[in-house]
Image (tube, grey):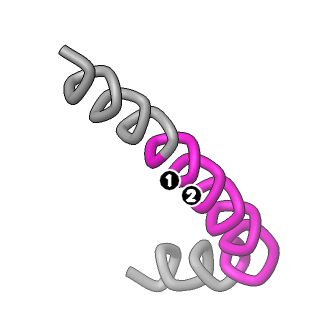
Amino acid sequence: MAFEVKNFQYLSPHSSAKLIMRFKSDTQWFGKMSEKFTENLSEM
């Protein structure tokens, strides 16, 4: 347990920011893809 907490503290400041940025870009990409998908559906 102590190791997990230490590991988390070690990871959190830098990596969580990277993860958040990656998550944001992934969700933006997913949003664009779903928009295109719904456009294609409405055209059919």
Would residue 13 be counted in the magenta stretch?
yes
Tell me if 40 is positioned left or right of 26 in this view.
left
Task: Provide residue 24's location: percent of width, then percent of height.
Answer: 60, 61
**Residue toward you, 6 or 13:** 13
**Residue toward you, 3 or 8:** 8
Tell me how far mark 2 sits from mark 1, CA to CA.
6 Å
Amino acid marked by disc 2:
Phe
**Between tags 2 and 1, which lies in front?**
1
Which of the labelled discs sits on residue 1, or is there none?
none
Amino acid marked by disc 1:
Thr
**Residue toward you, 2 or 32:** 32
Most distant residue in the right direction: 14
Tell me if 17 is positioned left or right of 20 in this view.
right
Please identify the quarter of the rendering in which residue 35 is found: top left
> Pointer 1: residues within 10 angstroms few (<14), some, or many (20+)?
few
Task: Provide residue 5's location: percent of width, then percent of height.
Answer: 51, 84
The residue shown at (50%, 53%) is 27
Task: Provide residue 41's location: percent of width, then percent of height.
Answer: 21, 24
Whether label 2 touches label 1, CB < 8 Å? yes
Tell me if 8 is positioned left or right of 13 in this view.
left
Q: Which residue is mark 1?
A: 27
Q: Quadrant of the N terminus?
A: bottom left
**Residue toward you, 27 or 12:** 27
Which of the labelled discs sits on residue 23, or is there none?
2
Task: Provide residue 7's location: percent of width, then percent of height.
Answer: 61, 73
The residue shown at (81%, 74%) is 14
Most distant residue in the front direction: 43
Does 10 appear above or below 33?
below
Does 2 appear above or below 35?
below
Give the magenta-colored segment's residue range. Answer: 10-31
The residue shown at (31%, 21%) is 40
